[in-house]
Image (cartoon, rainbow, N blue to C red):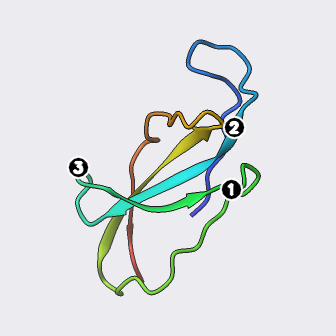
């Protein structure tokens, strides 16, 4: 999966303390669980291996700030593993 890094805080000011991302996933769009925390803010691509073929998964990403704050989740995307 891949995503774009945010450039602004929710109040419109420049984002200067991005420290990474957290990936959420699950088989129910309303019940996603944390999968991985990435501490490299330049990493905008992540591969999740070994998901069962034919299963539909839902994914979302959050941005993490240096002070530990976590953004709201991105839009949830759906993917059936082929």
Query: Which quadrant, please, contains the C terminus?
Result: bottom left
Question: Is residue 40 placed above or below 73 in the rendered structure?
Answer: below
Residue 10 location in percent, x, y?
56, 19
Residue 33 location in percent, x, y?
33, 58
Residue 34 location in percent, x, y?
40, 58
Q: Is residue 26 left or right of residue 61?
A: left
Query: Which quadrant, please, contains the N terminus?
Result: bottom right
Per the image, label 1 sits on a secondary structure element best described as: loop
Residue 80 location in percent, x, y?
36, 73
Instruction: Report the front residue among 77 and 72.
Output: 72
Per the image, label 2 sits on a secondary structure element best described as: strand
Residue under label 2? 18
Foreground: disc 2 or disc 3: 2
Mark 3 and mark 1: span between their CA atoms? 24 Å
Along the polypeptide, which appears first: circle 3 or circle 1? 3
Q: Quadrant of residue 55?
A: bottom left
Q: Is residue 22 left or right of residue 67?
A: left
Mark 1 and mark 2: span between their CA atoms? 13 Å
Residue under label 3? 30
Instruction: Report the front residue among 30 and 39.
Output: 39
Residue under label 1? 44
Question: Is residue 4 placed above or below 13 in the rendered structure?
Answer: below
Residue drawn at point x = 58 percent, y = 73 percent = 47
Question: Is residue 6 placed above or below 40 in the rendered structure?
Answer: above
Query: Are the residues at dot 1 and dot 2 in contact (C-beta closer than 8 Å)?
Result: no
Q: Is residue 75 left or right of residue 31?
A: right
Along the polypeptide, which appears first: circle 1 or circle 2? 2
Mark 2 and mark 3: span between their CA atoms? 26 Å
Residue drawn at point x = 68 percent, y = 56 percent = 44
Residue drawn at point x = 58 percent, y = 41 percent = 64
Instruction: Report the front residue among 27 and 56.
Output: 27
């Amino acid at each position: 999966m891949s995503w774009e890094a945010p450039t602004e805080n929710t109040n419109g000011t420049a984002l200067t303390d991005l420290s990474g991302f957290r990936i959420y996933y699950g088989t129910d769009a309303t019940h996603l669980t944390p999968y991985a925390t990435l501490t490299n803010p330049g990493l905008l691509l992540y591969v999740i291996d070994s998901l069962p073929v034919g299963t539909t998964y839902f994914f979302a990403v959050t941005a993490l700030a240096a002070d530990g704050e976590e953004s709201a989740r991105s839009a949830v995307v759906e993917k059936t593993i082929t």
